Image (tube, helix red, strand yellow):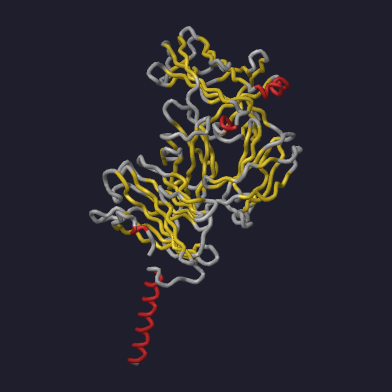
Amino acid sequence: MVPVLIAIALIAIILVATVVAFYFNIIKWPFNPVNTTQPTNYGVVMGNVTDLANNPVSNVKVSVGDQNSTTNEQGWFSISNVTAGSKELITFSKNGSVTTYKVTDVQVGAASFIETAISDVGATASINATIGGTAATPEGASVTVDPNSLVNSQNNTFTGNAVVSMTAFDPSDENQLNAFPGEFLGVSAQNQTGPIKSFGFMDVSVADQNGHELQLASGRSAQISIPVPTSMRSAAGGLGTCPLWYFNPRTGTWQEQGYGTYSPSLGCFVGNISHFSTWNYDILYPAAYVSGRVVDSNGNPVEGAEVKCWGRGWYQQRWASGETSTNINGTFRRIPVEVGVLFKYQALKGGHKSAVLDIPRSLTQGEEYNVGDILLDAPLVQITLTWGQNPRDLDSHLTARLNGNTTFHVYYSSKGSFSSAPYANLDTDDTTSYGPEVTSISRLRQGTYRYSVRHFAGSGTIETSGAEVNLVIPSVGIYRFTPPAGQPSGTDIWRIVDITVDSGGHVAAINPINDYVTGGDESELLLP
């Protein structure tokens, strides 16, 4: 009996030890590609913001749901903890600039990348609200306000001087086209949704002298003239009239309301609006469709990329995965495009882009055209770092010891390369609080990669910085790290995680380190 009890006790001890070993990552399941805690259940939204000359814009507030971020000096932003959902509205705002919006799909365990342009307010003019009047720009944009038609937030008639702000955009210019709010999809007066083409869009806002918003009284209207680009005036004249649409920031959609008449002498469409916001002269166009696949330079499919098609006055884009394809084959289907015109297309993911390609011929209505493979070397791993006001400067450090004893160190003074060895790059570096800093790896090689953060400058500590690191690995998930409590005095490096890659170039293990060390000469950042 005693030997039996001893045997049972030994078996129990072995089972407990095995469970503990698995828990602390001592033993690895052969069929489990990643050994760590479970990935987070949210998505990340990142991207960059430029002006109409394609220069980066800093200090732009970026909001999605109840999450906010601010662009860094290179115009980059990153927001984590974003609840997954389709058609999520992203808001971009800055004092003195026109607020704009983009729409994206947020997926659990994936990073969405958004690019947009933001414009300074084009022109302002003062009118007497009691008398009414017209505010105009040298380019021909104008707003005419009738007497006693403005009300304040309490819906009382406003009688003072009102400041009219107008910003007209040229949809034939690719940079200005990128400032178009939302998507190039509209809901018609007949409640039909379809692709739209813009002949000109304009943001209009009216405020009192203290900046408080004014609106049109119920039942009143204002006249709006939006210039048509010279290259599109012949087509505009052929239309004669054009539907008028407004962007609804609550739903993220364009809604048809009224129409405008083309004036050849002004080179504008002229019509009446019921409220002040962003307005657009658009037509629903008959569509053809584009399909294809995104692959890397080794011929492997790229999942989670976006494919963008654009022509004069419109663009459309779609994920290279999701509703019409699997998540692993990199295909995309039925991006709506304008019939009868030549247009361009491009794949992008994580801030990295394919070459811009041209469609070889115009398409016919209803046709689905396969463009074949689009070559894109996209990030296989992307790491984002954000933090608070202090310390002023935290720095990202990626080191590696690869098979054959090859080593590298990517950081602010050696930013690496995405297209050649070490196939890792510091995409953006921030030295003035908040971040983000983004590090991308385009090719994984056998060995171990280590990511660390160093306190470079400014008051406070890493522990109190509010720092957050998100490790994004497509098809695996997002892993979130925050500084552990109890940072020892004098330490300046937070060693975060080791990523082990197998001989096939796949992530085999994610092993958190999560400790603090001192490394004035940066030797502690390097793998032993």
- On the rendered structure, is 412 left or right of 223? left
- Image coordinates of residue 454 in percent, x first then y, are 34, 51
In the image, is residue 360 above or below residue 490? above
Judging depth in this view, the residue of 241 and 522 nearest the camera is 522
Quadrant (top left, top right, bottom left, bottom right) of the C terminus: bottom left
In the image, is residue 455 above or below residue 126? below
- Image coordinates of residue 187 in percent, x first then y, are 62, 32
Most extreme residue toward the left is 489
- Image coordinates of residue 322 in percent, x first then y, are 60, 50
Judging depth in this view, the residue of 403 and 501 nearest the camera is 403
What is the number of callouts on the image? 0
Most extreme residue toward the top is 131
In the image, is residue 206 above or below residue 340? above
Judging depth in this view, the residue of 120 and 432 nearest the camera is 432
- On the rendered structure, is 69 left or right of 107? left
Residue 281 visible here? yes
- Image coordinates of residue 305 in percent, x first then y, are 58, 48
Q: Residue at x 66, y 39 (%)?
A: 344
Quadrant (top left, top right, bottom left, bottom right) of the N terminus: bottom left
Residue 448 sits in quarter: bottom left
Residue 34 visible here? no
